Image: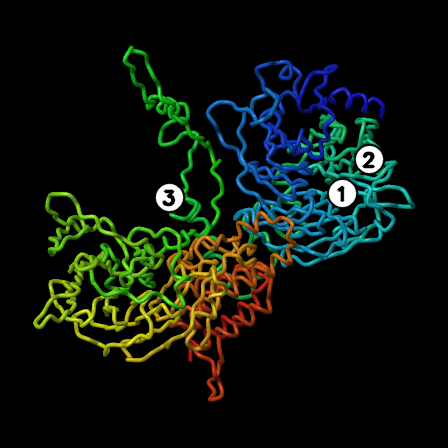
Amino acid sequence: AAFTIIRQLLSVVSCISTPCFLLDGLLTFCCKPIFSVDIHPDGTKFATGGQGEDSGKVMIWNMAPVLREEDEKNENIPKMLCQMDNHLACVNCVRWSNNGLYLASGGDDKLVMVWKRAAFIGPSTVFGSSSKLANVEQWRCVTILRNHTGDVMDVAWSPHDIWLASCSVDNTIVIWNARKFPEMVTCLRGHTGLVKGLTWDPVGKYIASQADDHSLKVWRTVDWQMEANITKPFSECGGTTHVLRLSWSPDGQYLVSAHAMNNSGPTAQIVERDGWKTNMDFVGHRKAVTVVKFNPKIFKKKQKNGSSPKPSCPYCCCAVGSKDRSLSVWLTSLKRPLVVIHDLFDKSIMDISWTLTGLGMLVCSMDGTVAYLDFSLDELGDPLNEEEKNSIHQNIYGKSLAITSTEAQLSTTIIENPEMLKYQQERQISAQANSAPGSTGPESSAPKLNSVMNGESLEDIRKNLLKKQVETRTADGRRRITPLCIAQLDTGDFSPALFNSVPILPSGSSMSCQLAPQLTSGPTMTPCSCPLHVKSSLLITSASKIEPMKALDSRFTERSKATPGVTSVKTKEDTSSDSEDKMATINKNLSFSKRKPELLLDGGEVVEKRKKGRPRKDKMAAPIAQSFNQVERRRKDKQYSPFMFMEPSVFLEVENEMSVVAGSKLSQLRCSRDGRDWNTLLPSSVVTAAGSSDILAVACEDRMLSVFSSCGRRLLPAIQLATPVSALHCSAHFVMVLTAGATLSIWDVQKQKALVKNESLQTILSGADTTVSQSLLTQQGVPVIGLSNGKSYCFSSSLETWTLIADKGDSLVQCADFRSCLSTQDAPVSSGPLAVMQGRNLNAGRLASRLSSTPHHLQHSMTLAFLENQLASALTLQSAQEYRYWLLIYARFLVNEGSEYRLKELCKELLGPVHKSAATAWEPTTLGLHKRELLREVLPVIGENLRFQRLFTEYQDQLELLRNK
């Protein structure tokens, strides 16, 4: 009888491979190893992973030609559906998600790729491939998960696809949030050898892993801590297997390992869930067991015809593959195997996959072939339906976790705090609302093309696109059609997952025209109520000379090209015998003559009427690298210089060297704002000017600084500067002057007080080639200096020193990876001083994602240090919104990494003392933000992880106590 069963099984075995060709009635590979196989949940296709020609290869096959011989002979039915060669090295594992929408693959390139189907009009082939087989289905990589520092050996989806687990030869197991790729939930450490296999408990309470360190470990999913460490059955084992694929029974009662030893003989160890006992095993294989796979169905004995139905005990079915090239199938109701097939392959068995019906099985081998085995109900028994299976789970575990779909329901942790329970429920409702068709969440903003989009099918869309093609006729009557690119169309739910990112601002001087009301750069002022952006440049002439720069002559002279709307000035020595003439050109579009130009405001632009005739040839100096309003100077010609700000109601005009009685020369300053005109006279020519909604500052050639109110009233006496002005800034009621003597000064006009007095820049100007490329003044009066070497500094009045806030060469900035901590609810502060100065250097860890060789603990430390630097920099810059933004990211990172001690310290600092005391130095606010209100924002972040519910409860209760007081 046994030989009859074996012969029946062998009669339905067929092998397939790629590139596929017919050989003795079998489809076979070109001797390329296949390391993994997995059948799609709907049973219509299956995936294989292995070694390609020069890279790893993932292939998706049609199941119909494998199941039916007539479909195999039908040339119209494709055998291969798609092949993907994105992996740079051999693919070790492929696994379908439980819902069938995604395919995960892991390989020797240390990457985990998640694939999703996309519909494309027409078949295609793999670029660069010599194969002529076309891809019938289009599968694209929607995310790449990078954290492992070694080959990825196995991947596994949790029940209901909440998590994706991956293990590697770097001795770690990484748990990924499958609903927020590429967010990492945790990294399990404890193995001291190569981790080669993973399996999930079918009820979602545990995950088990097996490694070459002679151990099998069981981890709890509630807190990701180790539940059991089993070593005795593996003490005699050696690391001789490529994989160690263990499996959990569908009823959750048994865990069967690969490669155990009993009396020096290879076995598959059976671990009971009750007490993790190891009293039983599957024996009989001559070499090490490489893979174990349970049938997804639970069976009961089939009743014979005419016999009275008797209740039978449900049992499970398990397949075991070994290096001895044999396959055995076991039933837990029998003491001996149901069937053993010897010499099925030429090399070791690598992976096994059952169909969802439980009656079919695919087995792959290192010899490059895949075998399919078909079973009957008489051989295995009657499978239980889902209702009966859920009933078994409910009887064993108290409830059926197979019918739940949320992470909170999957967790067996009891939520002790009603507030936390309420918060968890609100999160679920919010998540459901965001995923609803009419929601406005981040996912709903992405266009999705279903099989029927807005009443049109894909075929209709294709025809409409072809109708839009551009067709012309040449002179000889021939048609010429301009090619039209038809973009890829997605069907069903094949849109890629959306990932959070931080908007990247352009670096260098171009950012100065994007500043929000919090900043000012060069002549560009952005106060809260009246932004004064320079629209046209100040042009005046004078016969007097400008004193050349001294300490900063070589440091303020070079910079990248200035952007529109930003003044560009550069000093240049004159080789003539006359005194040195310093001339600066700001806007060549604005011309001038000896007469006062007639200015016409047309669409916010300054237009000048000029007389006919040949234009004047005036000698101009080279552009300079400073963003400030520098007057243009010309010899012997008196000029009027208009300022046109972005606010239409503000207009400033300067007339230098205006002749008065007795030959005296004065400069006149006129300003028009909101229909109110005012003017004043200055004894020297105006060199540069800057303004905000509150004040207007002008610097003259005699190194005098004058400050006026918005109505023209002088607010400060004329301030004598030691050296000429190189940059002038106004923000709110603050004035900043950067001089040619490499000094910085800031005055608070409202308080009539100097905040910074002649602070030298020599401390930060390291090297003769370092120049100042950027300067800012925040609304709080904090100066920021950007240098050509990529470093940015701000001067702290409280610390009385320069502090580094940005460095493009900083390894922490390049390697910190905090993308998983970004939230779609918190809009990034892209116009704050910190974001502006860091510019493109802040890449949210995009470089770090390519540094796959970086160990996780080092990556963790770098990210932690970077986030703490960001908090300190935002605090020094007195940027409240940026401080709040980075504080929430920092808290989310600590929660994701499980850093409980730092979380406690953060919460303690924000909460402050519960009882007031004279000795307490705690300040209730920081940068105008109430610390306890910040704690209220941090607590929901902590509440996302049930592991910290005690911490959440502690500080939630204390906040409520303080509120009641």
> Alpha-carbon neighbours of circle 2 within 10 Å: few (<14), some, or many (≥20)?
many
Q: Nearer the viewer, residue 498 or 296?
A: 498
Image quadrant in which the N terminus is located: top right
Position of 939 compared to 185: left or right? left
| Residue hosting label 1 | 244
In the picture, residue 652 is in which quadrant? bottom left
Residue at 20%, 57% in the rendered image? 644
The answer, for residue 365, to whether it is visible in the render is yes
Amino acid found under the numbered disc labelled 1: Leu
Q: 10 Å neighbourhood of mark 1: few (<14), some, or many (≥20)?
A: many
Q: Quadrant of residue 21?
A: top right
Q: Are marks 1 and 2 in contact (CB under 8 Å)?
A: no
User: In the figure, 908 relative to 147: above or below?
Assistant: below
Residue 490: percent from left, percent from top? 46, 32
Q: Which residue shows up at 57% across the image and 15% down it?
A: 76
- Residue denoted by label 2: 323
